[in-house]
């Protein structure tokens, strides 16, 4: 593995590129939102560790398999080349977000990729065993749904991402990642857990919408369906602003009805103001410039939610 890499990266750098650890951040943070919210309800310590670990492996699996099938379709080869041109002056963005598909870059072969997918899947199932023991019925239901959405997001013959269901699949997945840990641990549903999960789902789903729009030309060429290919880039621009307004409206309601501490989530305003400005300008490559910003909005919002519920527990 790695012997055919086309770029001169260190071993640790290549490992990071192959497993896309930066892309798993929203997954793990989403699970921690629900897990930390459940802390006050008790439960064995192992369940609080098992859930984020299982989600981490699931996140690695879905991103890795997505890269594998995007490599086969050829969509990443075009969009990452253009992304590098737009963000060539930002070393941070390139390293964190835009460094190309590991299969296209030659960091790993297709055969090695298929083996790794199987290994990651098996590891995720093994880590999830304690969760199944703790809450058998719902853990199996949520786990089966999660595995289905993870694999068939881009895998044929279902390919949810290419049939106009990608954004919905991401929204459902991230709602589950935030809500299910709370429900599995406590066995209850709360307005706070649902509200938090809706905001997380909304922001990450739109992160996917903009990310998909960066491969617009290739998606159109191969016949993929998404919000951008079905409704056009102007619709993505309009939706970007609508998501920003809706997300902050929901957070404001959470602060008014649940806890004023949720106002801390407005810490993401600098990202949102910048994204709004770039979207409004509609300059060349605006979708490439806003993709990292919406990534930042989603991740920082998740971190804020975790900090807020942690403060609630302490206070």
Image: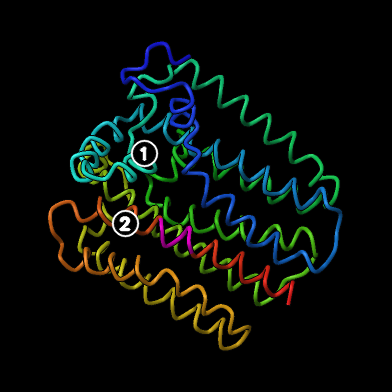
Q: Position of residue 278 (x, y in %)?
A: 21, 63
The reply to whether the magenta stretch includes residue 299 is: yes
Q: Which residue is painted at 45% across and 33% down in the image?
A: 156
Which of the two labelled residues, at mark 2 and mark 1, occupies the earlier sequence position?
Answer: 1
Residue 200: mark in rendering? none
Give the CA distance from mark 2 to mark 1.
Answer: 27 Å
Tag 1's secondary structure? helix
Q: Nearer the viewer, residue 88 or 23?
A: 88
- Which residue: 55% across, 42% down? 59
- Crowding at dot 2, Cα within 10 Å, few <14 / some 14-19 / many 20+, comes out as some
Q: Up-down: is 53 above or below 205?
A: above
What is the quadrant of residue 304 in the picture? bottom right
Q: For the view shown, which residue lies furthest in the top direction?
A: 3
Quarter containing the C terminus: bottom right
Identify the residue position indicated by label 2 in the image: 227
Q: How many marks?
A: 2
Q: Quadrant of residue 272?
A: bottom left
Residue that carries the numbered disc 1 in the rendered image: 95
Q: Is residue 212 left or right of residue 10?
A: left
Q: Tell me which segment is drawn in magenta.
A: 296-300
Q: Residue at x 38, y 23 (%)?
A: 9
């Amino acid at each position: 593995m790695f012997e055919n890499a086309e770029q001169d990266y260190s071993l640790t750098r290549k490992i990071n590129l192959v497993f896309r650890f930066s892309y798993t951040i929203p997954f793990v943070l989403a699970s921690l939102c629900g897990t930390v919210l459940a802390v006050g309800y008790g439960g064995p310590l192992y369940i609080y560790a098992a859930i984020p670990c299982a989600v981490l492996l699931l996140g690695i699996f879905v991103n890795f398999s997505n890269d594998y099938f995007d490599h086969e379709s050829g969509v990443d080869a075009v969009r990452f080349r253009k992304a590098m041109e737009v963000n060539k002056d930002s070393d941070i963005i390139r390293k964190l977000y835009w460094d190309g598909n590991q299969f296209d870059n030659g960091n790993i072969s297709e055969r090695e990729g298929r083996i790794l997918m199987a290994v990651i899947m098996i590891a995720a199932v093994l880590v999830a065993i304690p969760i199944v023991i703790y809450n058998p019925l719902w853990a199996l239901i949520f786990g089966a749904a999660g595995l289905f959405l993870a694999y068939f997001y881009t895998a044929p013959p279902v390919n949810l991402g290419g049939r106009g269901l990608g954004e919905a699949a991401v929204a459902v997945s991230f709602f589950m990642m935030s809500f299910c840990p709370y429900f599995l641990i406590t066995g209850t549903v709360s307005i706070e857990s649902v509200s938090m999960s809706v905001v997380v789902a909304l922001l990450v789903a739109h992160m996917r919408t903009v990310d998909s729009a960066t491969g617009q030309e290739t998606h159109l060429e191969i016949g993929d369906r998404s919000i951008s290919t079905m409704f056009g880039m102007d619709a993505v621009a309009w939706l970007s602003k609508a998501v920003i307004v809706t997300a902050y409206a929901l957070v404001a309601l959470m602060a008014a009805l649940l806890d004023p501490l949720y106002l801390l989530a407005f810490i993401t305003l600098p990202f949102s103001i910048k994204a709004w400005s770039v979207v409004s300008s509609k300059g060349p490559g605006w979708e490439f410039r806003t993709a990292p910003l919406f990534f930042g909005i989603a991740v920082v919002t998740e971190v804020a939610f975790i900090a807020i519920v942690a403060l609630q527990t302490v206070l």
